[in-house]
Amino acid sequence: EGRRGEYFQPPFYHAMAALMLGLFNNFATDTISEVVFLRILSSIVSMLTLYFVYRIASVLFNDKKLIAGIIIFSALLPSQININSTITNANFGDLISTFIIFMMAKSIEKGSIKNTVILGIAAGIGLITRLSIIPAIISIPFAFSIKYYPNIRKAAKPLMIIAAIALVISGWHFARNFSLYGDFLGVNAMRMDYAAGGKPVIDALYFPRLIGWTFITFWTSFGVTNGIFIGSLGSAAGIIIFAATYLILGIISLLSFYGLVKFIKKYKKVFNKTQKKIFAVMLIHLFILLLFFMSFNLREDFQPQGRLLYPAIAALSSLFVLGIYSLDIRIIKEKLPHLLFLFLLALDAASIITILMHFA
């Protein structure tokens, strides 16, 4: 990918994209056409991710307005739109993570050898695609334990099948990494590269900066290094726009959190037994992903990039929209999809103006 720390990345998406680009080169070979083709490929992958977000939301919730709101949030989140057409394995990684969550939901709903085999294949492909998929794979044993609780021993057979298939697909990659870098995941290669910048400095402002910039980049950030955001820190007017924008987003996020607190009191009436299990698996995946995110930022390199949480976009979208919906405000209950669409459309318009002004 031409940037530091990327040469150790698992090869599946790059190989697949290169194969498809080779086929495309039978029709066009100029660089601009190739870039456009690869961006379209990334967009198609992202649309598939949205489809599985919809399938997960449809399993979890019965309210069509709530499901529509979740899809609208996932589709129109400005930073998500920005990354959706970027030439990167991150989009495919988010797709595999979301697909694994979907297949776990299906397995909880109705277990079958077919679902187990598909999960094994998805896990195997995930292991040779991107490290950010590992939290989803770690969630698989939890999903089957929750499914079979209290008779957890029944989870052993499907888990062994999944592990066997995944190792058949990805075992060669582990062996290669160990041979080249001395560890199975290739993490040492990343550490050697990031070591040039030194370990992150943990001071009094570290966690406020980490949380603040992760929040900003989750919502609206653009450019190769997420260095473009609404407003700026270089002028008084830019600072006012910056502060106002993210203050509003912060207030809305806190309202969503308050709505979730209200929802917890009545979730037993909303979810059936299967939905509770699926919701628990989604939360476990999000929790594991957050642990990985914090560990990386604390031990390897300071990268407060909200997009690194997008492997859990199904959970994040569901939680945010569910929180807003659970405020029990009449107009929100009646017009949730419309209000979310208009709100995010305005945020997208502001983002486009910001990008145009940056490159003007």
Image: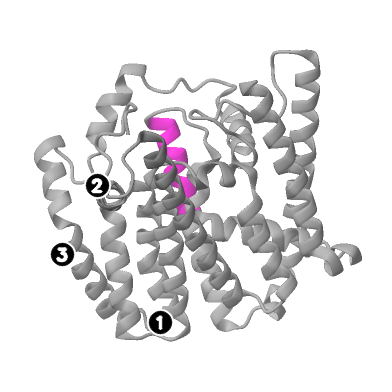
Quadrant showing the N terminus: top left
| Residue 213, visible in the rendered structure | yes
Which amino acid is tagged 2? Pro
- 10 Å crowding of disc 1: few (<14), some (14-19), many (20+): few
Which amino acid is tagged 1? Tyr
Q: CA distance from mark 2 to mark 3?
A: 16 Å
- At which x and y percent is residue 33? 40, 41
Discs 1/3, front: 3
Quadrant showing the C terminus: top right
- At which x and y percent is residue 357? 69, 24
- At which x and y percent is residue 155? 32, 78
Residue 314 highlighted magenta (yes or no):
no
Which residue: 72% across, 25% down?
Answer: 231
**Magenta-drawn segment:** 287-299
Which residue: 47% across, 31% down?
Answer: 303
Residue wearing tag 1: 148
| Residue at the top extreme, as displayed | 235
Residue wearing tag 2: 11
Residue wearing tag 3: 168
193 on left or right of 212: left
Is residue 228 depicted above or below 18 in this figure? above
